[in-house]
Image (tube, grey):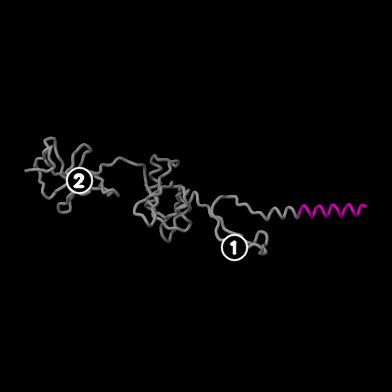
Amino acid sequence: MDVALARVEVAETIAESAKLNLSYCKVTAPISGRIGSLKIDPGNLIVQNETLLANVIVLDPIYVYFDIDERTYLRLRQSRLDGMGEAVKLPVDIGLHHEEGFSQHGILEDATASSVDPGTGTIRMRSILPNKNGLFLPGMSVRVRMALGAPRKTLLVSDRAIGSDQGLKYVYVLDAANKVQYRRVTLGQLQPDGLRAITQGLKPDERVVTGRLAELGPGWWSSPKRSTCQP
């Protein structure tokens, strides 16, 4: 009788072990994403902890890796030390190959590398951005535009309102008497919408003439009710 009871206990232990192994046949991914091509087919023999079943790729959020040079990295670090703070998340604009602008927007996390690559003089950075519609796929190449500081106010004028005189840039402005005045300016960066930043030479409340610069001259008079200027 003791032998029979022992055999029953062994059989129950074998059954519990079989149930446990059967529960491992259902694999649940700990993350949500998109599964790639299957590495095996139903009925194939697999080995525990050795056989790769499939790859699961996380698509939302997605990471964009890019490299910046040492000078840019130092400017970024200095801007944070000067008051922006480490907690400030800088925006990163992402552009795809089929578009001219930057339609996607992410947040700069930080440098993923602990040192500068001596071969290229660059350091690897990472940006995180939402990808709920699945537009981005791992391995894609994109264009990245990163701000190095907080937004600041800048005086902008139409780029076609800027003239050139032997390499010097100028604009025509109207004074209080509606007379044209010659004003030399220092230019900044051209914006995507065709506006040019003016760093020196203009005040925010001044009126800039935007057309027919070749026909104008200092001292000309402009009528408020007309769009042309007269000597």
Q: Say which amino acid is labelled 1.
A: Lys
User: In terms of secondary structure, what is the magenta stretch mainly?
Assistant: helix
Report which quarter residue 65 is drawn in. Answer: bottom left
The part of the chain drawn in magenta is 1-17
Q: Nearer the viewer, mark 1 or mark 2?
A: 1
Residue 10 place in picture, x, y as percent:
83, 54
Residue 1 place in picture, x, y as percent:
93, 52
Report which quarter residue 153 is drawn in. Answer: top left
What secondary structure is marked by label 2? loop
* 205 is within the stretch colored magenta: no
- Residue linked to disc 1: 39
Residue 68 place in picture, x, y as percent:
40, 54
Q: Quadrant of the C terminus?
A: top left
Q: Say which amino acid is labelled 2.
A: Val
Q: Residues within 10 Å of mark 2 (few under 14, many from 20)?
A: some
Q: Earlier in the sequence, mark 1 or mark 2?
A: 1
- Residue linked to disc 2: 185
Residue at position x 75%, y 55% from top?
A: 18
Count how many numbered circles sit on residues in the image: 2
Residue 212: which disc?
A: none
Between 78 and 110, the residue placed more toward the observer is: 110
Residue at position x 54%, y 52% from top?
A: 33
